[in-house]
Image (cartoon, helix red, strand yellow):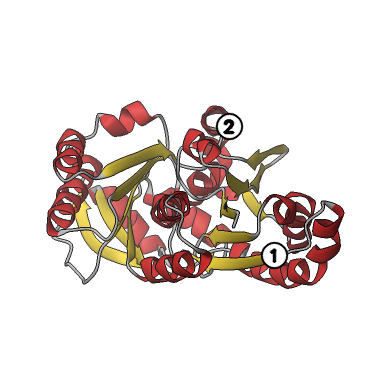
Amino acid sequence: MRIGLVVDSACDLPLEYLQQHDVTVLPITVRIGEAVLADHRDEEDTLEFLHAHVAERGAEAETTPFSVQQIQQLFLERLVIDYDYVFCMTIARTRSAVHENAQQASFAILNDYKSTRAAAGNNTPFALRVVDTQNLFSAQGITAVEAVRLRDAGEGAPKIRARLENLALHTHGYMIPRDLYYLRARARTKGDRSVGLLSAALGSALDIKPVLHCNRGETGPVAKIKGFEPAVQKLFEFTCKRIAAGLMTPTLCLSYGGELDELRALPGYDALRACCSEHNIEVFESVMSLTGMVNVGKGAVVVGFAAEGTAKFEG
């Protein structure tokens, strides 16, 4: 069985990895004023667009996921021909319309695929599963990397489906934003009142940075730490403890809203990489998608991993 994998462009994994493993990307279009870019996870394009526009007007950006019709067209023109079963892994449905659009498109795709496959000389059934990763940004990458591993190991679709849906329940994403004023302005643009003016003003005045945690589609602060770099160091130290306690997959994903050299210069980074090496954890690090950066601002750090049980973040 030929198994295909699809992610949306908010999934922070290196483009080279996605291309190497034939993972299809559903782009999200970003518009800031007259400037428009389809986010295909090209780091050079992202950084160029970032330096030119996001710093000044990113909070006003409009992000538009692939529509139901565009997803349907992508599948019927290519994916139903190239594959027999496709897993489409999306950003948390609580934070984006990508999952809902893919879910709606799947119904039409499963109704209309037969003639397309028959024309390509294939009369066997086609199946599609939309998986809500229940997470954001680099934490989405955990599910995608596991899907690649299982497919390449020759596992069947039923086992992959069960594993991915269980893994999504235990995937944790942690983010530290640099600019709370930006985060609040962006939230207001989207009608999200989760970051209040008072908390943003106090946080910026006192240089207090929240550590935000996402699991099972729910996002909220788990700590407040003075200073961006001390907050990142605490997050990296916490991650090392979780790694030592045991992860569900040998994978850690990192993303950063800017040049990766800046991420690698942050305190605690070298110790985190050493910890991953000691415990045979593969690290994937990438520039945050443009979609992610316009939503949380430049310079944000995101860590993603999968682990059973709960652990209190010690800030």
> Quarter-wise, where is residue 125 in the image?
bottom right
Mark 1 nearby-residue class (10 Å; few <14, some 14–19, many ≥20): some
The residue located at (23%, 58%) in the rendering is: 247
Q: Position of residue 54 (x, y in %)?
A: 54, 38
Q: Which residue is mark 1?
A: 126
Q: Determine whether, in the image, residue 195 is placed left or right of residue 210.
A: right
Q: In terms of depth relative to the viewer, which is nearer, 210 or 44?
A: 44
Q: Secondary structure at mark 1?
A: loop
Quadrant (top left, top right, bottom left, bottom right) of the N terminus: bottom right
Asked whether the beta carbons under mark 2 and mark 1 sit within 8 Å of each other, the answer is: no
Residue at image position (65%, 59%) is 84
Q: Residues within 10 Å of mark 2 (few under 14, many from 20)?
A: some
Q: x, y percentage for residue 150?
A: 42, 55
- Camera sees residue 229: yes
Coordinates of residue 271 in the picture (x, y in percent): 14, 37
Task: Say what secondary structure mark 2 lies in.
Answer: helix
Front tag of 2 and 1: 1
Which residue in the structure is indicated by mark 2?
49
Residue 178 in sight here: no
State the residue in front, 65 or 247. 247
